[in-house]
Amino acid sequence: MSTELTVRSGALALDPTQTEWTARQRAALEQLGLADAPVGDLMVFLHYAQRTGLDPFSRQIYLVGRWDPELGHKRYTIQAAIDGLRTIAEEHGQYGGQIGPEWCGPDGRWCDVWLDRHPPVAARVGIVRKDWAVPIYGTAHFLEFAEYRSDGALKRIWREKATHMVAKCAEALALRRAFPRRLAGIYTPEEMARADSTATDHHHRQVHPPTGRHTDRAKAERIDWDTEIRAADGDPQALRRLWDVARAVDPNNTELANQIAERGQAARAAADRAAEDQEEETPAESDAPAPHTTDPKPENESDAPE
């Protein structure tokens, strides 16, 4: 199938033969926040928009600048919504559908529905190509993509839609692996959220040095994890808070996160068993005394039950 950009109508429509942005297109790019973007990055952006056929002025594909603390200036990345990546895949003649998503916990067992209250460890999505013998998978680890606030807590969308967010990252990884010629160098916002959060946190630390125990990385890295785990052991909520801190302080230490998660799962299971035992000891509703609905009304207040 041809990958040539379809000619669209409109004042801002891209021409597949143009070699630079028109004056109208440049004005529109400035309205999109790219007034300070270097010419080289804008030319690369034009190339990607033409190559993929996605419309930058409909926000199907966009150029995002984020502060790079090592370079000391913004570095621009080309991004597209997951629907844009799916559109490109569907237009490819060899696209044969998807497998998944699936999620797994610390035990590494994959399932197609995630029922645990805590986020999964990873998600994976398989892409089928008609010209390949086996599907190709993209696997996203939650710790590598989840976005955190400056206090170490998960951002709301990553806390409330953990499975959805990490699955989108896995799908984007898989689509790029399956169609590198069309999608190489294009990332989704979900994949780059962690980078945005890190850049923002870097500026925050420069202007407002942190003072709290778990927001001060230098102090947090000296936490005695064995002592903290023993102190929280048996308390599901305390272990959950400790797990969030561990992931914020040392996000690549999966062994520590899994150790805390296992303690938390054991504590939750013990609490559930205790609740079940208490329910069994409570008399059933049918065994309780029947209410005296036929008793005559008390003649005065002293006769009324308190």
Image (cartoon, rainbow, N blue to C red):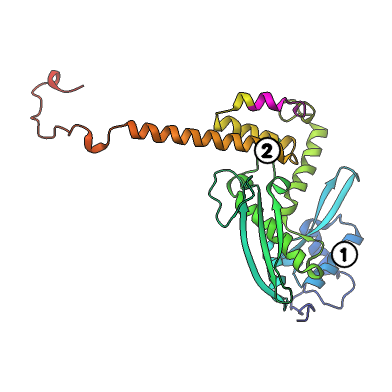
Question: Residue 275 at x, y = what percent?
Answer: 42, 34
Q: Which residue is painted at 54% across and 44% down in the image?
A: 117
Q: Quadrant of the N terminus?
A: bottom right
Q: Nearer the viewer, residue 148 or 55?
A: 148
Q: Which residue is painted at 80% across and 34% down in the image?
A: 205
Name which quarter of the figure residue 132 lies in: bottom right
The residue indicated by pointer 2 is 257
SS of the residue under disc 2? helix
Q: Is residue 51 above or below residue 235?
A: below
Relative placement, left or right, of 258 versus 279 is right
Q: Is residue 180 visible?
A: yes
Q: Nearer the viewer, mark 1 or mark 2?
A: 2
C-alpha distance separating marks 1 and 2: 40 Å
Q: Quadrant of the C terminus?
A: top left
Q: Overall secondary structure of the magenta stretch?
A: helix
Amino acid found under the numbered disc labelled 2: Ala
The residue indicated by pointer 1 is 44
Q: Does the magenta stretch include residue 304?
A: no
Range covered by the magenta-colored residues: 220-229
Tag shown at residue 261 = none
- Are there few (<14), some (14-19), or many (20+) residues within 10 Å of tag 2? many
Q: Nearer the viewer, residue 168 or 250?
A: 250
**CB-based contact (under 8 Å), mark 1 and mark 2:** no
Amino acid found under the numbered disc labelled 1: Val
